[in-house]
Amino acid sequence: MTPFPRRTPRRAFLADLGMGFTGLALGAMLHRDGVARASSGLDAWAPPDGRPHFEPKAKRVIWLFMIGGTSHLESFDPKPELNRHAGKTIEESPHAGVLDSPYTQNVRIAVPNDANGHIRHELYPLQVGYRKRGESGIEVSDWWPCVGDRVDDLAVIRSLYTTNDNHGAQLQFHTGRHSLEGPFPTIGSWVHYGLGALNDELPQFVVLGTPIADCCGGMNGHGASYLGPEHDGVSLAVDPKDPLPFAAPGPDVSHEEQADSFELIDRLNRISAVKYPDDAQLRARIKSYELAFRMQMSVPEVVDLEAETAETQALYGLDRDETREFGRLCLAARRLAERGVRFVQIFHGSNGGAGAWDAHSNLRSGHQRLCTQVDRPMAGLLTDLKRRGLLDDTLVVWATEFGRTPGSQNGDGRDHHPFGFSCWMAGGGIKGGVVHGATDELGFHAVEDRHYVTDIHATVLHQLGLDSRRLEVPGYKRLDIDHGKPIAGIIA
Amino acid sequence: MSPRLLLLPALLAVLPTTGRTGEVDYLRAIKPVLAERCFACHGALKQEAELRVDTVALMIEGSNAGPVIAPGDVAGSYLVDVLTGAAGFRMPPEGEPLTDAQIGLIRDWIAAGAPAPEGEEPQADPREHWAFRPPTRPEVPGVGDPEWGSNPIDAFLSREHERLGLSPLPRADRATLLRRVALDLTGLAPTREELLAFVSDPDPDAYARAVDRLLQSPHFGERWGRHWMDIWRYSDWDGYGSEVRESQPHIWRWRDWIVESLNADLGYDRMVRLMLAADEIAPDDPDALRATGFLVRNWYKFNRNIWLDQTVEHTGKAFLGLTINCARCHDHKYDPIPQVDYYRFRALFEPHEIATDRLPGQPDTAKDGLVRVYDAHADMPTFLYVRGDEKQPVEDRPLDPAVPGMFGAALEIAPVVLPITASYPGLKEFIRREALASAEQAVAEARDALIAAREKGESSAEASTPDEADAPTPIRLAEARLKAALAELESVEARLAADAARFAEPPDEERSEVLALRAGLAERRAALEKARSERLLAEKSLADARAALKEGDPATKKAVEAAEQSLAEASKAVEEASKAIDGPLPSDYSPFAPIRPRTSTGRRRALAEWITARDNPLAARVAVNHVWMRHFGTPLVESVFDFGINGKPPSHPELLDWLAVELMDSGWSLKHLHRLIVSSRAYQMRSSAPLDHPNVATDPENRWYWRMNPRRMESELVRDNVLHVAGSLDPMLGGPDLDPESALATARRSLYFRHAKEKRATFLKLFDSANVTSCYRRDVSVAPQQALALANSTLSRSQARVLTARLIEECGGDEDASFVTVAFEQVLGRAPDADERDACLAYLREQADRLADPAALSAFDRGPEPPVMPSDDPSRRARENLVHVLINHSDFVTIR
C-alpha cells in the first residue's frame, strides 16, 4: 500500500508557499483549527497553544467510570458501625446527628416523586468483609482482591460529595454542574482543549465502552459543549472491523484508489492555498485530511488486541468469560495511552438506563458480580502500566456518580447516596498507598477534607500542568465551583 | 493576562505606552481587578454603603463611613482591611478573596500615594448605555468613491475605510458571487446551467434578478428558517426511550411555520408576537398557533422552574439581546436589572401551559396534533426565590408581571376573552363531524359483521362441538357489538345536542340542562352496552381457552386462568355500569375536548407588543445583527445575545442603527433587509487578499469589512449540497421530523431530521450542527472526523457516482479534459485552473490504469456498502473518484 502523501514532503511544500508554517510545533499547527473557530472580534484572546501552563507530572489520563453508583461502603470505605447497629434506624443509633447536618440541604432533587433517591433510615450491615492490603495496610473490601493488591499505588479519596440525588449525577461527575443546568464541557474535553495532541494519528479524547444512557446525560457525558465538537470524546469500539463512524469506506473502494484520491485532494487544496494564502481554515483542513487518512489505518490497529501476548491478555482477564469484556477495554486503553492519546474515558455498567451498579436491591449478588467483572482488568491495567514505565506519567482515575445509602432499601439494597462516597487515583504524580478524607462513622457525610467532584477535575488538570482559569473561554463565565481545587494531600 | 481585562477596551485604549509607573500600575493592575470584583456593587450600577470605587477620587471621597483609601497611608486605608479580612469581614462577599499578590499591588499603589490618571472618568450611568436608548435613523454619510455611495450600507462602511486608510477589495468574480449569494439565500449552490447563464448574462441587472429569484425560492425559507431555528432554540422532542422529557412531539409544525412565514415575508415583528402570544392574538387560527412552539420548546418534564428559567433566559437573549437570566440569583452584575425584575419577567409566563390540539383526520393526539400554549393558571402567583433557590420563595410578596424597570415601560396588560372554540375545541366543526362519523361508522361495521355472522351461522350450525355450545355464538357476539355501537351513537348524538344548547347564543339554560341530563344518561347506557359486549367477548375467550386446555401443558392452563381473570373483570365492569344507570342523575357528560379557561391573561401579548413596539431599543438592533452576521460571517455587535453593558460595543453603531430603523420602516420586512445587504458593494467584495496587502497591517481581523469573509458551510449545507450537486436532493418542503439515523439514506433537506439534545444525526453533528441548548452563533470546527465523513460516508460515495453518470449523459464523455471542467463547474461552481486541470487529468489517467488491473487492488475489508456501486469501467470509475475528490475539496464546503 502506498503511504500518503508520497510525492511532496509536506513541510517543504508549505515553506514554498510562504505560509509560514515551518518551525511551528505540531501542537501549534493543530490549534490553527481553534484559531479558525474563534477568529472573530477584537479580542486578543487566543485558544490554548497545546503547551501546559506549568511543569506537568502526567501526560495522559485513563478515566474509569462505573455507571449506576458503586457502593463506597462495600468497596473502599469500611464502616463497622453499620454492622454494630444493623437493623436499627439512624435515629436509634448513636449517630442520629447525621440527619440534621446542613449538608443534607445541598442536594437538588432532579426527578420529583421518584421512588429512589431518598435517605434510608434502617441501617444495613456491610455485605462484604474488609482486610488490610499492601504495605500501606489500607482496608479494601474482599470484592476487590486484585485492586487490593495494587493499593500501594492508589490514593483513595473517601470524602467526595455531589449534589444530585439521581443519576444525572453521572453527567455532573464529568461536567461539574448539576444535570438540571444542562450540558457543559466535560473533563476530557477540557484536557483535549488545553493540551491537544501527543499523536496525530488518533483521536485525542477517546471513549471506550457504552457511554452513559440518555436518561443521565447521554453523549453529553463525553461532550465538549461550547468548546466545540472537535473536542468531543470519540467513541471507539474495540473492534478492528468497525472502530468508529466513517472509519473506512467499504468494500466498494480499494486502498490504492483511495490513497490516490487523498493525494489529489491534498494537491488541489494546496493549489487553493496558494490562491487563498489568508484562509486559515483551508490550512487546517489540509491537515485534517492528513490526520483522517492516517486515522483510518491507526485506529483499527490500536484496537487490535491480537497483537498482545497471551500473558498480557491474561493479565487483563481476557482469558476469562467474566472479565473479558471489560479487560478488552482496559487493554485497549493502555494501547491508546502508550500511543499518546490524552484522555481515555472507559465506562462500565451501561444497561441502557441508570446503570448496572444501581443496587436498589440484591446489592450483594449484584456488586459481587460487577466487581468481579472489573477488578482483575483494572488491576491488570495498573500492573501493565507500571511495568512499562507508563504509570509515572499516566494518571488513572476510578470513579462513580455517587455512593450508596448506609440504610437499606427493599431489604437487600442501598439507595443513591450523594453526601459522601469514594474514588481513587493512581499514577501521574499521585501518592500511592494513601487515604485522603473521611466520612462519618456511618459513611453518611463526607466530613474530613470534603471534595466536590470538580476537585477531581482540578487535580487531573493540575497533574497535567494546566490551570483551568487560563482555559476559560470568553463569553462562558465559569464559577469558582466549576474550577474546583487540586487535592494537595494526594499529590506526590 | 486575564480575559476579563479585555472587557475594558476603552481603558486600554487610553493606556499610555510610557509614563509614570504608578499610573500604569493603577490602570493595568488595580482598576481591572476592582472593575471585575467591586464595580457591580460600588460603581455606577449600585452604591452599596454609598461607596463607589470606579475612580480614585471616589475612593478618597469614600463611603458613608468615610474615605476608604488614604494616599500614602496603607494602615489607614480601610479598603485594604476589608480586602484582607482584617476589618472583621471580607470583601468581595462572593467568590474567592483577592489574591495576596493583588492586595500587595493595591498596598504598594496606596503607599506610593495612590496616584490617579489624569481626568479619570467615573463609570457612565448604566441607563444611558447605547443599546438601552431607542435607535434613531442616522444621516447617511457622503463618501468619495461613487461606487460606494449608492447603498447606505456601503456609505457607512466606506466612511470607516476612508478614516482608516483601508482600500476595499474589488468585486468577486461572477461565478464566486453567484455561488455565494445562492448559498446565502437558499443554502443550495447554483447548478452548472445557472452558473453558465449568469456568467454570460450581459444584462447589468443580472445580479439583481438573481437575487430576486433566490429570495422568491421556497428554499429561502428553509435556509433562513434553520438560522432562526438556531436563535430560537428549535428542538424536537427529547427523552429516554419513548418518554418525552423536553420539548414536545409534533413541534415540527413550528419549524414549518418559521419556513412558511419567512417565505411569505411575514414581518419580523408579527413573527415575534405570534411566537410569544399567538394563542391570544390569533386564538382561532391553527396555522398561527404553530408559532408558539417557541414557548413549547422549553417544556421540561421534571421541573417547572427550569422550564420557566429557560423561557425567561431565551426570550431575553433571542429578542432583546439581554441577559436577564443573570439576575436569577442576585441583581445583575452589569445591567440595571435587580433580581426582582427577573421574577417579574417570569410572571409574564407564569400562567402558561402547553396542550396538544386535535387536527382534522387524526383523533389521537399522540400520533399527530397541534402543540401550542395557552394560559391555564391565571391566578398562579410568582415569588422571588432567595438566591435563586426554589426552596426559598418569598411567599408574602407575590410579584406582578413586568418588563425590567430600567426601560420605564408600564405594560398594558388586558385579559383576552377567547372565542369559545379556542377555549373549548370540542365545538369545532371537524371535531363534531368526526365524532359523529366515527360513531356511525362503528354502527355500520357492526351491522356488516352481524350480517356476516348470520350467513355463516346458518351454513355451519351443525358443526359446533359440545364445548363450544356453552360459548356465546358469533351471532350473539355480533348482536352485542351492534347494540353497543348503537348506544354509543345515541350517546354521541346526545352529547353533540347538549353541547349545541350549552354554548348557544343566546344560551337556553333550561333546554341546556335537560339535554345535558339526557347526554349523561345516554353515555351511561352506552357504557353499559359496551361493558356487556366486552363481557360476552371475555366469555368467548374463556370458552376458547378451555377448549384448548391440554393436560401437562402449563401454558394452556395459564391461558385459562388469565381468561377467567379477564371475565371476572368484565363482569365487574358490567355490574358497575348497571349500578351507575340506577344511581343518581348525572350532573354532566364528557366533553369532546378539554375545556380550558375562557380568558387568557394577556400578559404575553403585552410583552410581545412591547418588544416589537417602535420605541423598543433592542429588538430591531438584535435582529439586524443576527442577519448581518449570517451574511458577512461576523456580527456588528460581537456579543450577539448580550447588548448590555458587559456586551461588546458595535463596530459600526450608526450602520447598526440605520439598519434597525430601516427594518422597522420597511414593515419589519426581512426580505427587504436581505436584499439591501446582498445588493451592497461590500457584500460583493472578494474574500481573499495577499498576505502582504496593506490593509492586513491595519485590520488583520477584517473588523472594518475591507474584504468579504470566507465561511464554511453550516453542517446542513454540507449534506444538502452533496445531494444537490448530484441532482438527488428531494425538494419537498415541511412535514414531520425524520429519523436522524436515516440522514445518510434519505434525500430530504437536513433541517427536517430530528434534532434534539440527545438525538442528532452523526454526519450533521460532526460538522457542528446547532447546539440545541443555546446556539446564537454556530461554532465552526475543522476536524479529521469531518474528513472521514466526507471521504468515507455512503452518502458522498454514492452521490459522486450518481453525478458522474449524469454529467457523462448530459455533457458527453469523450474527453477527460471537458469532463474535468464540467465536474468543477457542477461541484465547485467554477472552472478549473490550468494547474488543477493538469492534476486532475494525471489523476484520471493513473486511476484508470490502476483500476484496469483489479488483481493488483486490495479492497477495504470493512465499512458499509453504499446504495450505488462503482462503475465496472475503469475510466468511468476514475471519473467517479474524481467527482468524489471534488466533493472533498476545501472549496466545496467553503463559501468564498
Image: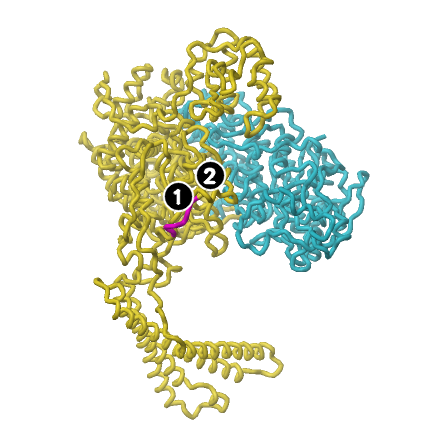
| Residue type, numbered disc 2 | Gln
Image quadrant for the C terminus of chain A? top right
**Where is residue A273 shown, x and y percent of the image?**
42, 26
Chain painted in yellow in the figure: B
Residue B823 in view here:
yes
Residues A428 and B833: in front is: A428
Label 1 vs 2, first from the N-terminus: 1
Q: Is residue B103 left or right of residue B851?
A: right
Q: What stretch is highlighted in magenta?
A: B377-382
Q: Mark 2 points at which residue?
A: B786
Give the position of the N terminus of chain A as an image quadrant: top right
Q: What element carries label 2?
A: helix
The Cα–Cα distance between marks 1 and 2, rounded to whole angstroms, is 45 Å
Left/right of residue A169 with respect to residue B209 in the rendered view: right
Q: In terms of depth relative to the viewer, which is nearer, A339 or A15?
A: A339
Q: Can residue A270 be seen in this view?
A: no
In the image as oriented, which residue stretches furthest toward the bottom? Answer: B462
The x, y position of residue A198, in whole percent, is 59, 31
Q: Is residue B396 magenta?
A: no
Q: Which amino acid type corresponds to the residue marked 1 in the rendered image?
A: Ala
Dot 1 corresponds to which residue?
B347
